[in-house]
Amino acid sequence: MKKFKIPFSGRSHNYTEKEIETVVKVMQEASTLTQGEYQIAFQDKFCDYLGVNHAFALNNATSALELAAQLCQFKEGDEVIIPAHTYTASAYRFLKNGAKIIWADIDLKTQVVSAESIRACISSKTKAIVVVHLYGYCADMPSIMDLASQKNLVVIEDVAQAIGTKIKGQMAGTFGDFGVFSFHSHKNISTLGEGGMLVVRDDEIASIVPLLRHHGHCDFNYVRKDYWKPAMGNLDFPEFNGLKIWPNNFCIGEVECALGEKLLDRVDKMNQEKRLRAIHFIDELSKFEDIEFHRVDSERHNYHLLVGRFLNDKRDKFIELMADNGVQCVVQYYPLNRYDFYIKAGYGKANCPNTDNFFDNMVSFPFQHMMGDATFDLLIKTTKKVLSEI
Amino acid sequence: MKKFKIPFSGRSHNYTEKEIETVVKVMQEASTLTQGEYQIAFQDKFCDYLGVNHAFALNNATSALELAAQLCQFKEGDEVIIPAHTYTASAYRFLKNGAKIIWADIDLKTQVVSAESIRACISSKTKAIVVVHLYGYCADMPSIMDLASQKNLVVIEDVAQAIGTKIKGQMAGTFGDFGVFSFHSHKNISTLGEGGMLVVRDDEIASIVPLLRHHGHCDFNYVRKDYWKPAMGNLDFPEFNGLKIWPNNFCIGEVECALGEKLLDRVDKMNQEKRLRAIHFIDELSKFEDIEFHRVDSERHNYHLLVGRFLNDKRDKFIELMADNGVQCVVQYYPLNRYDFYIKAGYGKANCPNTDNFFDNMVSFPFQHMMGDATFDLLIKTTKKVLSEI
């Protein structure tokens, strides 16, 4: 494996001394290491941060997507609209839970779905939409929610990369029926590499999520005279709309929750720092006509990732030269319909020209938050040099 | 909630300074926080510890049980034999994966299943057995494996509480087709509250577990000229015996793996310390005829939990008086068939008299490893006092 001066990092940020102290303190002092006070504190603070009533900490964002898919209660033939330009976790849990996928195309400029690209996929069988705020840009949720409301569709926002972004003051993840957040190693804030959160709008659904998260554990519907008879509370089969839903074990540990709660104190600052850098990078490259960027100088974009699109056929040459100059650029996201997995599942075809165009011409620059200023300057300098040469 | 002098702890052990330093170091230095070098090191050391070839670190033991259940590939009508005296995670993933449960009874003395109690449940439809080494006692695996071999049954060992126990030098979890380990907050060693490991005997099965663990990620079946074409490797649909198996996201973080690897250095010592205490406790109470214990002074029992059974009707009075004296005893494990969950799933009936007898008369003492010597002495003293009084 080539050693890069500026690698495309497997993690996005460092931890502060305070964050590390929090982890140490919980390791030393917590009376339980899972399903305790820190989970509650993390969830409560997350609710406050977003301005919602129900948030559930989970072991990863895939678990959040699985819960949303379970709660859609798909019937035979039901369709769910999902962008082909996203990571696989956004899509396959819906397939597993019985839905048919209809691949939506993205807007070439914003790289996310729009009300128009979703509308083109709607049929009488459409039950749900997954909107992915990819790269950190919040899709046009007001328009999408208008459409969903007209057509009576369940809306799942995949906010894995877009925590803290807003449209007119309203946070991404709070428009739809479900908001899915990720604290994976690559993400804006990470709870030790794995973690997630599910935001739920409906009160009744919210009341069964704890059972779905933890094996069906719940109280008995009576007060026990002796705490050990029966022992340890009840286990029940969660039901919604009169149908049973299988419980899971999607629990996240207390240390991760305590860390996540602390990270919420600086997520806005981290987003702001990345946005300032992204805008600076884009503006520095504005005279190069080979490549275009999606420039959004507002809280609607957190620039979790920094991506550009070549307007000619120079992308591969560019990445090769960047690599020769020590910078590891990558290409994201392989259109899901091209993977063997989706081909074998019967979803190998998609009518998504923008998805294909973007993937075939895009470049994703190393853009981890923990990149130092000198490294960031070197990134700009090297990019300019290579763009001048090709 | 009553405040106890000796609570039944939500965690089983403390972390040493070295273990905490390991966590801090990985937080500061790891190049990725998931699916990296520490996971490999943890798995390799776990294999060495057990003397096996394939071990896969997971986000919890339920995920390990889910993988084992998926890999059984149950067909309509297939039956799996599971003890009714265990925690729910041992059972319901098999139900979800299409098996019918046949509840096996336990042996009253050992509190685990035996070849005889399993034999009584076998039919022409039996496909698999789940053997739970409950409380830290390794069931009679040589006899059970003889039976399984005669009847061609898949054997899943649930070693959640029995890590490090042995029969004639062979480790629990290495007899069956699958060995399931837990690093939950309550368990012998805990990777920050949540974590698990799946040990797999078959080489072919082992080759697909990484795909099942992580969304179906795998290499393309050709070498890419440019690392970004296609980006990030392939996604495939795992297959076994010509049948597809849905992938999952059961990944555990690097910090947890690094900590787990360190904990393996002292798991034998911790087991030995608990065993010595348990034997001492049991011997101290030998003159009390109301209660009996399962005394095993060998590496076959690690006394993860310390449980006794009353031979008369004094159990409830005993727990009440212990609580009055500041000691929180509990009752485990509610026979699974009595829970609303299993009743609603159609498994509310069981012919398991020993399971009922044991649950109705058992007591589980606080026995966390981190209990200090003075507290342990107080536990013995209080138990003697209460047994003398009732």
Image (cartoon, coloured by chain):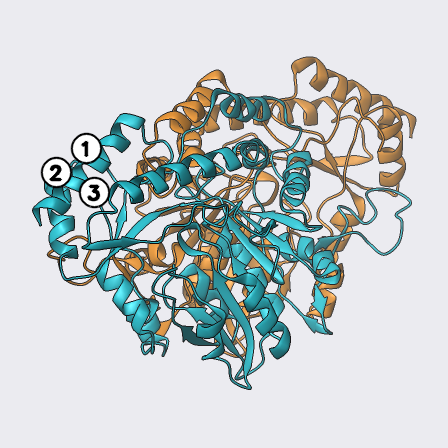
Chain colours: A cyan, B orange
Q: Is residue A194 visible?
A: yes
Residue A360, quarter of picture:
bottom left
Quadrant containing the N terminus of chain A is top left
Kind of residue indicated by mark 1: Lys
Q: How many marks?
A: 3
| Cβ atoms at labels 3 and 1 below 8 Å apart | no
Identify which residue is drawn at 16% across, 62% down. Answer: A312
The residue identified by callout 2 is A325
* Closer-to-camera residue (A351/B79): A351
Identify the chain of the residue marked 1, using the numbered disc in the image.
A
SS at mark 3 in the image: loop
x, y percent for residue A342: 34, 71
| Cβ atoms at labels 2 and 1 below 8 Å apart | yes
Residue A366, quarter of picture:
top left
Taking the view exactly as shown, the residue that stands out farthest to the front is A287
Residue B205 placement, left or right of B58: left
Task: Please name which of the two marks, 2 or 1, marks the residue nearer to the observer.
Answer: 2
Q: CA distance from mark 3 to mark 1?
A: 8 Å
The residue identified by callout 1 is A5
* Closer-to-camera residue (A382/A134): A382
x, y percent for residue A234: 76, 54
SS at mark 2 in the image: loop
Identify which residue is drawn at 32% across, 75% down. Answer: A344
Task: Classify mark 3: residues with Cα within 10 Å, few (<14), some (14-19) or many (20+).
Answer: many
The residue identified by callout 3 is A328
Kind of residue indicated by mark 3: Gln
Q: Is residue B121 visible?
A: no
B324 shown above or below B209: above
Identify the chain of the residue marked 3, using the numbered disc in the image.
A
Lower position in the chain sequence, tag 2 or tag 1:
1
Residue A347, quarter of picture:
bottom left
